[in-house]
Image (cartoon, helix red, strand yellow):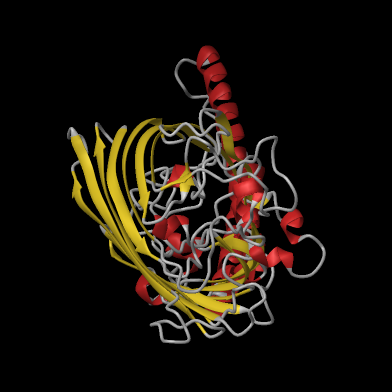
Amino acid sequence: MQGVARMKIVRLLGIISLLLGVLVLPSRAQQAAAVAKTDPSGTADQPIPPAVLRELEAMKKRIEQLEGELRNRDTRQPSTTLTEEKAAGGPSVPDTRVASTSFVQPQGESSGALSSTSVPEKPQKAEPFAFADWTWLTGSPRTKTPAFDSKFVTPEIRADVDYVYDFRRPKDDTIGGSSEVFRSHEIQVTQLGVGGDFHYDNVRARLMTQFGMYSFTTPRNDASTARGQWNLDGAYRYLSEAYGGYHFSAMHGINVDAGIFMSYIGLFSYYNFDNWSYQPSYVSSNTPWFFNGVRVQFFPTEKLKIEPWFINGWQSYGRFNGRSGVGGQILWRPTSWMSIVSNNYGVGADTLGNPNRTRMHTDNSIQIKYLDRPGAFLSKAAFSLTGDAGCETGGGVSCFGSRNAPKQSFLGFMAYNRFWFHNDRYGLTIGGGKINNPGRYLVLVPPINGATAASGTPYFTANPGDPFKAWDASLTWDYMPSQYITFRTEYNYRAASVPYFSGRGGVTPPGGNQGSPGSVVDGFTPDLVKDEARVIGAILVKF
């Protein structure tokens, strides 16, 4: 700090000397002009006053003395000033000792020897997956830049509003078997989300609400809330994501988060704005959208993420029994046109009231962008392929089936192909999939007489060995005039091996729900059919 101060003093003295010179020279010029008028011959020319000359000579000697002292001090301590300032977290000061060698370089030393005394900054490691644009992926938002950002918070607002035309025209307007659409021939708010990402001093948090249909339909598919007290489905009803954590600057980053976070088993995002289609196939629709627990995200390289989970259970606010679940994700993106992800779950005992039955599940996806021609009519094309397998064992069931333990398994796939047109302003997606789930342990319970996952319903059983096979296909057209909005139209056809979807008579007893949720109503039989066809129109917004 003293060296910086001395440099400032030297510069100040130099400025003073220049000012004196400026003041003296005009004065002498004026005197010469006056003499010239009275003495055209020039014989009256006067010299600079001796007092001024003595003062300038003294200033010159003083400046040379200060330069010498500063030169000797910098030779003894070549890097102390800059290093101390950085270590103290002070302002960044340009290294004038390197920029102006005449100020500090001792006689006989080269400028290269002097610059070697500077402390090199440690190179920053690349941000994970920042080497490419991933907005083409299904399950990822396509917004390239946030509408607003700050050092503390990146806010986020989402709106999902739809209208469904069901060709079966159920008289109670109720749609079953889906985790994305729930009522027909009505305009419904599927989700209104307000929240964002918070980040400061390596501390991180995320909040996203789920007002609208999601606030009721998502908790009703969690049976764990029937165990114990404190009404967990009410406590978390209006939250889709809510967690806090910390970022450690090791490897390419380590994040530790606790709370409610997305699962992404089944590839598609919980938020329809992020997906290539509105109604995903069964592999995605029947697997978890969220987990409640702790996750740790390791980024060994900029292209790889390893993320273990310790969670309450399979899409559950609490535990179904006395055992928690574990799982994890491995995400690898070796190039800008490929993404491979594997999600795995196990150990959890996720059948309510049956502590001896455990579950295992593996979910694996690949996405490839095989065409990218900016400016062309067909500007981009990509496909995704997902395969899932799982089973339950113990408590009267087995993975492969036996005489005393029926088969309780899950096997399915889904595939989608996406095209983008006219600078990604329009999108066309063709896709579908198929599942086989004997035992029906992952099949969504139809909402007959208010049935939930906890209550079940005698009108659609989920006993060990009960067969269930289903398949679907969809065609989706998107208009995307801005990165923040999508106008979507979609056609779906879905079919099952047993009556499952809402028919013309609906699934609600005359006069509304009666008795406890899912109970039998005398004289009432729900109208369940084996297939359905519908058209969806939606407006999707994300800021």
The answer to which quarter of the image holds residue 249 is: bottom right
Q: Farthest right residue?
A: 230
Residue drawn at x 18%, y 32% is 377
Residue 240, image x, y percentages: 62, 53
Q: Quadrant of residue 30?
A: top right
How many numbered dots are placed on residues in this image? 0
Instruction: Please state if 224 lies on the left or on the right of 41 as rendered.
Output: right
Left or right, 383 with respect to 173, comes to left
Residue 60's spot in the image, x, y percent?
A: 58, 55
- The one nearer the camera, 457 or 325, is 457
Left or right, residue 381 beside residue 67: left
**Furthest-top residue in view?**
37
- 28 w.r.t. 430: above or below: above
Q: Can you see residue 55?
A: no
Q: Position of residue 253 (x, y in %)?
A: 50, 71
Residue lying farthest to the front in this orientation: 523
Q: Compared with residue 34, is residue 272 higher up or lower down, i.e. above or below? A: below
Q: Which of the two residues, 253 or 109, is positioned nearer the viewer here?
A: 253
Residue 38's x, y, as percent? 55, 13
Residue sitting at x 56%, y 82%: 357
Vertical order, 507 against 222 (above or below)? above
In the displayed structure image, the side of residue 125 where residue 453 appears, left or right: right
Q: Nearer the viewer, residue 295 or 12?
A: 295
Can residue 143 be seen here? The reply is yes
Q: Quadrant of the N terminus?
A: bottom right
Residue sitting nearer the eye, 165 or 19? 165
